[in-house]
């Protein structure tokens, strides 16, 4: 895989990532994109979403705090991104746990996201499986969700990324586990949501979405490890994480601990 090249292209090209995301993590997500070298832009107004999705490098649709109006803007953005060939990421936050977004996510996924990114419970629920999410958190393991992820990948032609102790990246043929220590990210809000934005940016700079997703997870996880070593609790971790995103060298991805899995 060409992971360092993906990260280098990301820094050099600074993709414009249009985020329709939740109110909890908007500011953090913008800072994560800036620190990592991308350009964030947030709007969720119907009427603006359509032209912007066609002009942006990539689009993130995150269902964390949907409003009726935001859902309309998301439909516009997805329609427009699909027509323009703009890569887009679906993050099905709390799908399975809450009804309105679950119905919406199951409908919009049929528009074939370039990448579906979520925790194990969200991916299982999106695939129509029994799951045991607790609000925005997963109570299921990545291993339990891999078969559900593959079902989504086959059905919609999407890459699927499942976050957890190790992150699983899946498409119809391949499954790779990315091993980094991202535990610090589970102690602040937005750790998963901002990862979706970085994934969107990496998709914009590399033609193979599977490799782009692996690179995004690896880069993000390496930054989290560096930040953990430099911090003394969740507050200082959040600040150190931004510094680490800016400091991680693309070449660090050469030695990323990736495990290719084969399943029957
Ligand atoms: N148990 C864990 N140990 C180490 N890192 C984790 C663990 N769970 C999640 N992470 C990391 O935290 C980040 C956010 O993942 P997660 O918390 O699963 O997302 P979400 O916020 O969507 O539930 C990812 O980079 C993931 O690798
Ligand atoms: C707490 C919360 N509630 C609705 S969205 C959200 C943010 C969740 O962010 P993450 O799952 O990335 O920590």
Image (cartoon, rainbow, N blue to C red):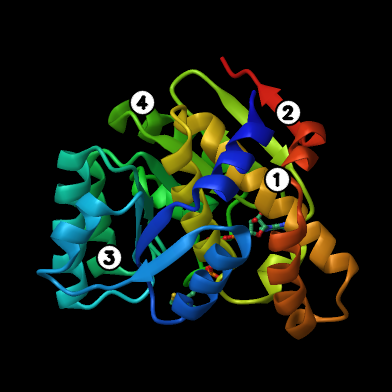
Residue 192 placement: quadrant: bottom right
Q: Which residue is mark 4?
A: 154
Q: Which residue is mark 1?
A: 166
Q: Which residue is mark 2?
A: 259
Q: Position of residue 119 (x, y in %)?
A: 53, 54
Q: Which disc, if any, is residue 215?
A: none
> Which one is earlier in the sequence, the residue at label 3 or at label 2?
3
| Chain-order first, disc 2 or disc 1 | 1
Q: Position of residue 14 (x, y in %)?
A: 50, 53
Residue shown at 69% from the left, 39% from the top: 178
- Residue at the far top in the pictured view: 264
Residue closest to the eye, 237 or 260 = 237
Secondary structure of residue under mark 3: helix
**Residue drawn at 70 percent across, 61 percent down:** 246
Which is nearer the N-term, disc 4 or disc 3? 3
Label 1 lies in ligand 1 vicinity (Cβ under 8 Å): yes
Specify whether residue 130 is in view. no
Q: Is residue 116 left or right of residue 72?
A: right
Regarding mark 4 in the picture, which secondary structure is present there? Answer: helix
Q: Separation of disc 2 and disc 4 at Cα?
A: 21 Å
Residue 202 lies, with reference to residue 75, above or below; the image says above
User: Crowding at label 1, few (<14), some or many (≥20) Cα neighbours within 10 Å?
Assistant: many
Residues at circles 1 and 3 in contact by the CB criterion of under 8 Å: no
Marks 4 and 3 sit apart, C-alpha to C-alpha, by 22 Å
């Amino acid at each position: 895989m060409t992971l360092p090249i993906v990260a280098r292209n990301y820094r050099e090209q600074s993709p414009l990532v249009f985020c329709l995301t939740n109110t909890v993590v908007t500011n953090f997500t913008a800072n994560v994109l800036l620190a990592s070298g991308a350009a964030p832009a947030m709007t969720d107004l119907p009427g603006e979403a359509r032209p912007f999705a066609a002009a942006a490098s990539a689009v993130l649709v995150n269902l964390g705090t949907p409003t009726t109006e935001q859902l309309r803007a998301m439909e516009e953005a997805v329609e427009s991104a699909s027509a323009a060939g703009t890569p887009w990421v679906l993050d099905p936050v709390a799908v399975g746990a809450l009804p309105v977004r679950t119905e919406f996510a199951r409908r919009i996924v049929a528009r074939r996201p370039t990448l579906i990114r979520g925790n194990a419970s969200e991916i299982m629920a999106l695939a129509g499986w029994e799951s045991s999410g607790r609000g925005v958190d997963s109570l299921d393991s990545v291993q339990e969700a891999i078969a559900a992820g593959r079902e989504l990948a086959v059905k919609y032609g999407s890459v699927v990324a499942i976050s957890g102790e190790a992150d699983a990246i899946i498409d119809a043929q391949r499954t790779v586990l990315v091993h980094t220590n991202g535990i610090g990210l589970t102690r602040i809000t937005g750790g998963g949501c901002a990862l979706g934005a970085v994934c969107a940016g990496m998709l914009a700079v590399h033609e193979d979405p599977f490799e782009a997703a692996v690179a995004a997870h690896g880069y993000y996880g390496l930054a989290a490890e560096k930040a953990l070593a430099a911090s003394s609790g969740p507050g200082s971790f959040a600040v150190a994480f931004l510094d680490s995103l800016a400091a991680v060298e693309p070449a660090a991805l050469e030695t990323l601990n990736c495990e290719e899995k084969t399943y029957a």
